[in-house]
Each structure stands twice: as C-alpha cells, then as structure tokens.
Image (cartoon, rainbow, N blue to C red):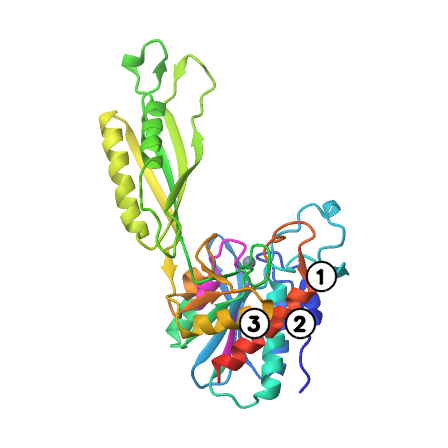
Amino acid sequence: MSTINALQLAKELIKFPSVTPIDAGVMKFLEKKLKKLGFKTKLIEFKEKNFKPVKNLYARLGNKGPNFCYAGHLDVVPPGNLKDWTVNPFKPSIKKGHLIGRGANDMKSSIAAFVSAVSIFLNKNHKFNGSISLLITGDEEGDAVNGTRKVVDYLKKRKEKINFCLIGEPTNPNKLGEMMKIGRRGSLTGKLIINGIQGHVAYPQRANNPSTTIVKILNELKNIKFDKGTKDFQPTNLEITKINIDNTADNVIPGLANASFNIRFNNKHSSKSIKNKINKIIKKISNKNKSKYKIEYSVSGEAFLTKPNSTTYMIQDIIKKVTKIKPKLSTTGGTSDARFIRKIAPCLEFGLVGKTMHKVDEAVSLSDLKKLTLIYSNILKNYFK
Ligand SMILES: [Zn+2]
C-alpha cells in the first residue's frame, strides 16, 4: 500500500472553503480518503433550532481495543479581507518553505499529518492490536453546538469506547515541540443587569443610581482572590469585559446599568462554586443599595486536567526526540474541544505552531509538517507496541 503525503493532503483540504458552518464537501473528501485506508466511517449531521446544521465525521479502523483517537476540526475562520492576503486563502501556495492558506495551521495540516502518519504506520503494522479512530468536527470555530459536544453524546449512547484521545490543535506558541496541553481552564461568562430609578441629577434622593451599585459590585468582583494558582494551573482570573450605561443626558440619573465579565478558572473551582461566590457579592451590594438585579451565566467549559501518565511521557519523549525540545505540559490558553471529549476519554493536545492562526497569510512550515507527521506516526507505533 502506498502512503499518503501530508503536504499533498494538506493542500487538498485547504482548497475547500469550509468556513463554519459550511463544509463545502471537505468531510466527504476526507471520508473517502479514510475509507481507502480501511476505516469504517460515519458522517453525522447535527441540527438544532436557530443554528445551522453541521457535518461531523467519526471513522474507526479495527474493532479491538485499545482505541486510539485523533480529534480535530475541518472548519476554518473566514479569511477576512482578501486584499490583505498575498495569496488566495483557498488556493494553497508554497512560499519560502511555508504552505500558506486558511487552515494551514488551524488545523487542516495537522489532520493531514495524522492521516499520513496512519498510512505510514499501517504500511509496517498491517495487523496491530487495537483500533485507530478519528473524530473530526465542522463546528469548532463557530457556535460549537452541532459539533464535538454532540458527537461525544452520540458515541456515549453507542457505548463506543475511546481509550485515549490526541487533539491536534496548534499548541506550540513559537516553535514545534515547546508545548503539549494536558488540561484546560474553565470559562464562565456573567451578564449583570442593575435596575435603579431614573431621576433628576440634582435630586438624587428621589432616584436610585444603578451606576453606583454596579461600580461597587464590579470593584468587589475584580478584587476576589480566588486562588494563587496550582502546580498545573495559572491563578483563576476575572476580567470585566463590558460596562454599559445608556444615557444621552448629563442631567439625568440613568435607570439601568449592565456589565459583562469572564472568569477563567482552574480545577480548584467548578462553575457552580464560582457562581455561588459571585451571587453572594451581587446580592449583598444590591440589597445595600436598594437596587434590583438580574444575573445570567453561560459556561463554555469546566476546568480539567489529565494527570500525566505513561502515555503522556511516551508522547513527550517522542516530541523531544524529533524536535530536540522537551515540551512543557501546559494548561494555558483558551478552551478547546477537549472540554467535551474528556468526558469519555483522557485527552492530550499536541499540534503545530499557532503563531499565524486566524491571521491573514496563515502558514505552516514545511519542515514542521514533516516533523509532526513523524511524531504522530511514532506515537502510533509506540502506543500499539
Ligand atoms: Zn482550531
């Protein structure tokens, strides 16, 4: 069997303008490639009211355990102003040792590297003990409603066992080999509305200024000392992201004030424990100021950590051998689809260098792409040894 070339496949994937939630045929294309390698595939489209339907792909080779899964996404962010690009974002081009195009590092090239790695692995290990699977979504960059979250529920219902999941998101800040992710912080957003009583600014006794209340609340929220951080996590942090007091006159006390804040929290907390803490403060200050309030929360993920084990160290060693850099085991950065997958399998993330992700002229170095393919194929070799 001939092997699949990672660069060739990356180019082919980039040609599909699969801006979330449009898949532009890229899922079917990858499905065909995987079928040729012997995978059993399932193209799953999820729908939900008020959201566009999205296609996802689950493919598995083999029916024995352990099941090693690779997860990623084929959707990309919009290219933005085409005039700012030096090339057409969906006509992959090679310049100065880099492949340029939308999705070149977030994360079509990583998927190409893994599929190529599978073909290399199968060439020498036609009969291996276990299964390889891919969980590919088309809804990572968008609302993430019809993506990995639902695929995980789908797999759970079908009692599909995944023993380990490698997520191929770009994890390295500057150089390939610098960083693996072994967990992620949780993220909680709060939207606060304070109702006061509008009135003449010269007669404050007849009004109730919601700005006074909201400023006091936000000040106390910002000053909460959640924790000092842990060995694996940065300290929990709250940032106020919006303060809005609509008022067109300078002689009127406004009737309404609202604000938003976001908290990135480590595994010393849950979204529930944080909400409790914040609710107490809001209630205390609102009552004291005789203001009415409303608070709404949305949780995009809980904090989690995959405790480093022999697989973690095996992968760390392989990365070090190929890149000559020992990767840090990190939990920094935003959320990823690991927040869903960790509910059914231990997760670890390693991919390309994220420096140009979501930017114009998004690029991947050709030598990184080769190295990542080698890393992925060595991971498979060692995992199934
Ligand atoms: Zn991504």
Figure quadrant of residue 321: bottom right
**Image quadrant for the N terminus?**
bottom right
Percent position of residue 236, x then y: 36, 47
Q: Report the residue marked by disc 3.
A: 321
Magenta-drawn segment: 132-151
Work out whether residue 31 can be spotted: no
Percent position of residue 170, x then y: 56, 60
Percent position of residue 320, x then y: 54, 68
Q: Which numbered tag is attached to residue 361?
A: none
Q: Secondary structure at mark 1?
A: strand
Asked whether 185 falls inside the magenta stretch, the response is no
Label 1 crowd (10 A; few <14 / some 14-19 / many >=20):
many
Relative to 193, residue 165 above or below: below
Tell me which residue sits at (64%, 77%) in the image: 33
Label 2 crowd (10 A; few <14 / some 14-19 / many >=20):
many
Relative to 221, residue 245 above or below: above
Quick one: which residue is furthest to the front in this view? 324
Q: Is residue 333 left or right of residue 263?
A: right
Query: Ligand 1 is found in which quarter of the picture?
Result: bottom right
Q: Report the residue marked by disc 2.
A: 6
The amino acid type, in three-letter code, at marker 1 is Leu
Q: Which one is nearer the viewer's eye here, 175 or 67?
A: 175
Relative to 197, residue 201 above or below: above
Q: Nearer the viewer, mark 1 or mark 3?
A: 3
Figure quadrant of residue 191: top left
Q: Report the residue marked by disc 1.
A: 99
